């Protein structure tokens, strides 16, 4: 189902006109009302009058997460404070949080793009959506909540955690849709297995999973264990929250709501804009945002864009599901390694669970990568010599994929810490 055909199936010319008009208005507003952006533009010698077409966006300055932290809390506010009716922030676990302030129009846009997201996965007003994203300053829970309400479906605002209660609610209220992080969905599947829950009988039809990178192999695992169709969704606190991009029923890349969010792909080293199909860092401009609009935000997410037509009929550009991040990319002896590459290998192997941890250490002048992987119960009962042989086989598979040697260690079932939010995949001891 296409929720908003007017904007989801716009012609290229109509969309370009819409984007251009909104960008011109946005740049004028930011130059006049946000000293941070006025200073940035002045440093580049750019004036609002220089922006005449959406292609002129390349003249504008980038914004980084550190920029947002530097002007915490409200240094990017572009509307009067009395017009702000809701504020969200990132966790701030690695520094000051980033802030997203919303006007009523911003909340309407958020509800709209999340309604599109849910409709892409076949959600209708007849569905019951169990929303296991966290509510609060984190954008996940309320973003989904607003979208479900806009769609007219029933929302169960259970938030994250308390797995036994999640499973009970799922059964009692006959949830048809699940929303949470992909790693938590597998945690639910594991908990359900222990509680004797038969997911085949639950009636779940769709799941919307985001907030952390995940692979196609993990999708297969989720779909097999929860008996639903798993959709990848994408969003950031800095931009609006969830709803920036989503997969449709064909699960072939994520449609970006580019009537609200203008995407670019850049070379992360040079800042040069790259062509369709070229992998690089995703950059987003919030062309319709009022509260805290952002110019050319460097997401640090690695992906590529695809403007070819989608079978679903939407004309919006699609982004490939995340290939990694520039800031969780590991450099091991000169080789760039993303956790998602390792996950892709591990989840194709019989005998291991989709729970793993990467440990990086420096010995002398060399970096070493250890991959801890959980065995399933069947493999755990195997003989030691067979386990050692399997570890060697995994090491060969990883070398073939990564072109570096790793040390694989099979660990007991359930020994890797579980997370009800984003999974902690990397322990980098080089930083200690």
Image (spheres, grey):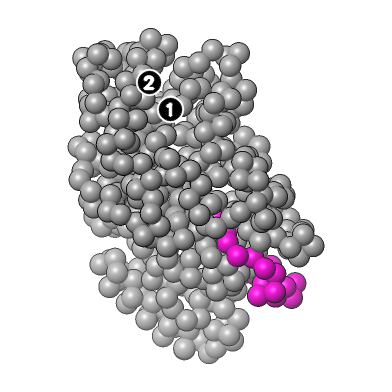
Q: Is residue 430 visible?
A: no
Q: Is residue 198 visible?
A: yes
Q: Quadrant of residue 34?
A: top left
Q: Are marks 2 and 1 in contact (CB under 8 Å)?
A: yes
SS at badge 1? loop
Is 380 drawn above or below residue 53 in the view shown?
Answer: below
Where residue 288 is drawn, which disc sits there?
1
Q: Position of residue 6 (x, y in %)?
A: 43, 40
Image check: 225 left or right of 161? left
Q: Earlier in the sequence, mark 2 or mark 1?
A: 2
Q: Position of residue 193 (x, y in %)?
A: 68, 74
Image check: 38 left or right of 237? left
Q: Quadrant of residue 162?
A: bottom right
Question: Residue 400 versus residue 283: which sits nearer the camera?
Answer: 283
Q: Residue at x 48, y 22 (%)?
A: 290
Image check: 399 left or right of 241? left
Q: Position of residue 382 (x, y in %)?
A: 55, 88
Residue, disc 2: 26
Question: Residue 68 versus residue 252: which sits nearer the camera?
Answer: 252
Question: What's the CA distance linking mark 2 and mark 1?
Answer: 7 Å
Q: Residue at x 29, y 69 (%)?
A: 401
Question: Residue 224 versus residue 149: which sits nearer the camera?
Answer: 149
Is 378 drawn above or below residue 395 in the view shown?
Answer: below
Q: Residue at x 42, y 65 (%)?
A: 216
């Amino acid at each position: 189902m296409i929720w908003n055909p007017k904007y989801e199936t716009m012609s290229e010319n109509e969309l370009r006109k819409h984007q251009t008009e909104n960008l011109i208005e946005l740049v004028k507003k930011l130059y006049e009302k946000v000293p941070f952006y006025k200073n940035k533009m002045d440093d580049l010698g750019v004036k609002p009058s220089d922006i005449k077409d959406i292609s002129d966006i390349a003249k504008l300055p980038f914004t980084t997460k550190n920029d947002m932290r530097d002007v915490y809390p409200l240094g990017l506010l572009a509307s009067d404070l009395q017009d702000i009716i809701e504020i969200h922030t990132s966790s701030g676990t690695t520094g000051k949080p980033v802030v997203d302030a919303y006007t009523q129009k911003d909340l309407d846009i958020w509800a709209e793009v999340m309604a599109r997201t849910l409709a892409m996965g076949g959600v209708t007003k007849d569905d019951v959506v169990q929303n296991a994203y966290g509510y609060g300053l984190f954008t996940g829970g309320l973003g989904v909540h607003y979208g479900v309400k806009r769609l007219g479906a029933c929302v169960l605002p259970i938030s994250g955690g308390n797995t036994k209660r999640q499973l009970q609610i799922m059964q009692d209220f006959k949830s048809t849709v699940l929303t949470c992080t992909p790693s938590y969905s597998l945690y639910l599947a594991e908990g359900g297995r222990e509680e004797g829950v038969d997911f085949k009988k639950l009636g779940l039809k769709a799941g919307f999973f985001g907030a952390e990178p995940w692979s196609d192999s993990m999708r297969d695992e989720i779909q097999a264990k929860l008996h639903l169709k798993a959709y990848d969704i994408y969003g950031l606190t800095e931009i609006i929250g969830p709803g920036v991009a989503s997969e449709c029923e064909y699960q072939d890349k994520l449609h970006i709501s580019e009537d609200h969010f203008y995407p670019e792909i850049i070379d992360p080293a040079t800042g040069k804009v790259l062509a369709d199909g070229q992998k690089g860092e995703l950059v987003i401009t919030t062309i319709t945002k009022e509260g805290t609009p952002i110019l050319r935000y460097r997401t640090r997410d690695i992906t590529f864009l695809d403007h070819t037509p989608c079978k679903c009929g939407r004309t919006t550009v699609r982004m490939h599901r995340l290939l990694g991040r520039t800031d969780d990319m590991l450099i091991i002896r000169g080789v760039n390694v993303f956790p998602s590459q390792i996950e892709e290998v591990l989840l194709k192997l019989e005998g291991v669970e989709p729970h793993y941890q990467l440990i990086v250490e420096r010995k002398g002048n060399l970096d070493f990568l250890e991959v801890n992987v959980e065995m399933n119960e069947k493999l755990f009962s195997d003989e030691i010599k067979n386990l050692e042989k399997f570890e060697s086989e995994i090491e060969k598979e990883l070398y073939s994929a990564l072109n570096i040697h790793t040390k694989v260690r099979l660990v007991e079932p359930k020994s890797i810490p579980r997370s009800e939010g984003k999974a902690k995949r990397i322990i980098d001891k080089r930083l200690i």
